[in-house]
Image (cartoon, grey):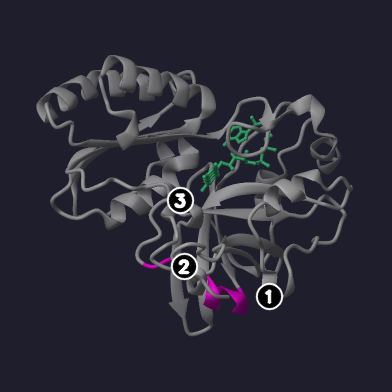
Amino acid sequence: MTANADSPAYPLRAFDVEVRRIKDVGPHFRRITFCGDALDRFGVPGPTRDLRIKLLIPAAGQPLARLGGPNGQLSRGWYQDWLKTEHSGRGFIRSYTVGAIRATAKGREIDVDFVIHRVPEGHGAPASEWAAAAEIGTAVIIIGPEASSITSATRLSETGIRWEPQGASQVLLAGDETAVPAISSILETLPANVGGHAFLEVPDPEDFRTISTESSVRVTWLARQPTHSPRGALLDAAIRRTVPKTVSSAAPGRDIYAWVAAEAATVKVLRRFLVHEAGLDPKRSEFRGYWSRGKAGSGINGEPLGQEPQVRQSNR
Ligand SMILES: Cc1cc2nc3c(=O)[nH]c(=O)nc-3n(C[C@H](O)[C@H](O)[C@H](O)COP(=O)(O)OP(=O)(O)OC[C@H]3O[C@@H](n4cnc5c(N)ncnc54)[C@H](O)[C@@H]3O)c2cc1C
């Protein structure tokens, strides 16, 4: 594929992979390690940070659908086209984060940490259910960046990376359990001269994990159990306690970059506080709903649960 500064190649493609290892890393997280020859072509220059991939999950009882041209090539607009395909065997696409990528004697591997979550009775959660039932050798398709298609003209966001701190020396990271893989990866690559805070809200203290970082970012874990804290409330309270002091100490340059990802309603509340009350510059911030309560699909544009027949089918 060729690319030039005016029209960089589309960097995403579909990769055929299979499950190599499965490990539970806390009561609500299952780490699945994927392998496959195609992964030799997967990647971004530099650290993966919050690199998003998409998974094509087969519908229950259906074979894995195909995606992309020969070698899995995709072009801009593929996802919108896929959404328009109406057939029962289409499967489901959900977004996940690359937790780690490594080279081994048996080829490259990618770790993805799946939150195993519950859904209201009578509804399905194809990705969470797929991860809970996965076995060694189960095949799936990952949609992600192809290293050779990325040039200096490729926008980072097109590869799936949203973490762009623009040289900030102070960072604020906040997320729920779905953002733990992204926040962990980001912290692992932050240099020593970066400070700030990271807040991670998870269901249970046993979901806490050790994150190595050279930075001086202070990491605070928050658990909704055993006190049954409403989702997002601990994050909100911790940020309201900490951030006004951080912002005022950084004024007037506002050298703070904020990155927030969680359930959509939590992100909305945190954004309102951080931008409108604490005065963070929204242009130096990344706010992302990773999922929406009562909606099927990643991000903020999922289908209200009662309206996606395939989700209901997959639960049977
Ligand atoms: C850029 C990006 C990166 C992401 N990275 C990760 C990641 O690394 N690990 C990860 O686990 N998730 C991650 N997510 C979130 C994940 O895509 C969503 O949680 C997704 O909705 C799960 O799909 P599902 O098929 O299990 O459930 P869906 O079919 O989408 O939803 C079914 C029902 O479950 C609810 N639901 C969905 N997710 C959760 C949850 N986590 N907890 C409780 N209820 C939920 C929905 O509101 C709905 O009621 C990411 C999302 C984005 C946008």
Comparing 36 with 158, the one in front is 158
Q: Which residue is mark 3?
A: 157
133, above or below 204, in the image: below
Q: Is residue 225 visible?
A: no
Which residue is nearer to you in this view: 147 or 267? 147
Q: Is residue 163 left or right of residue 82?
A: left
Magenta segment? 36-45
Q: Position of residue 52 (x, y in %)?
A: 51, 52
Mark 2 Cα-neighbour bin, 10 Å: few <14, some 14–19, many ≥20 = many
Q: Earlier in the sequence, mark 3 or mark 2?
A: 2
Q: Secondary structure at mark 2?
A: loop
Marks 3 and 1, the one that precedes in the sequence: 1
Q: Residue furthest front?
A: 6
Residue highlighted by disc 2: 150
| Amino acid, disc 3 | Ser
Q: CA distance from mark 2 to mark 1?
A: 16 Å
Q: Quick check: 181 left or right of 121? A: left
Q: Secondary structure at mark 3?
A: helix
Q: Kindly identify the residue that appears in the image at 52 percent across and 29 percent down.
A: 263
Please state which amino acid type lies under the numbered disc 2.
Ile
Say which residue label 1 marks: 71
For mark 1, give the secondary structure.
helix
Q: Residue at x 69, y 58 (%)?
A: 134
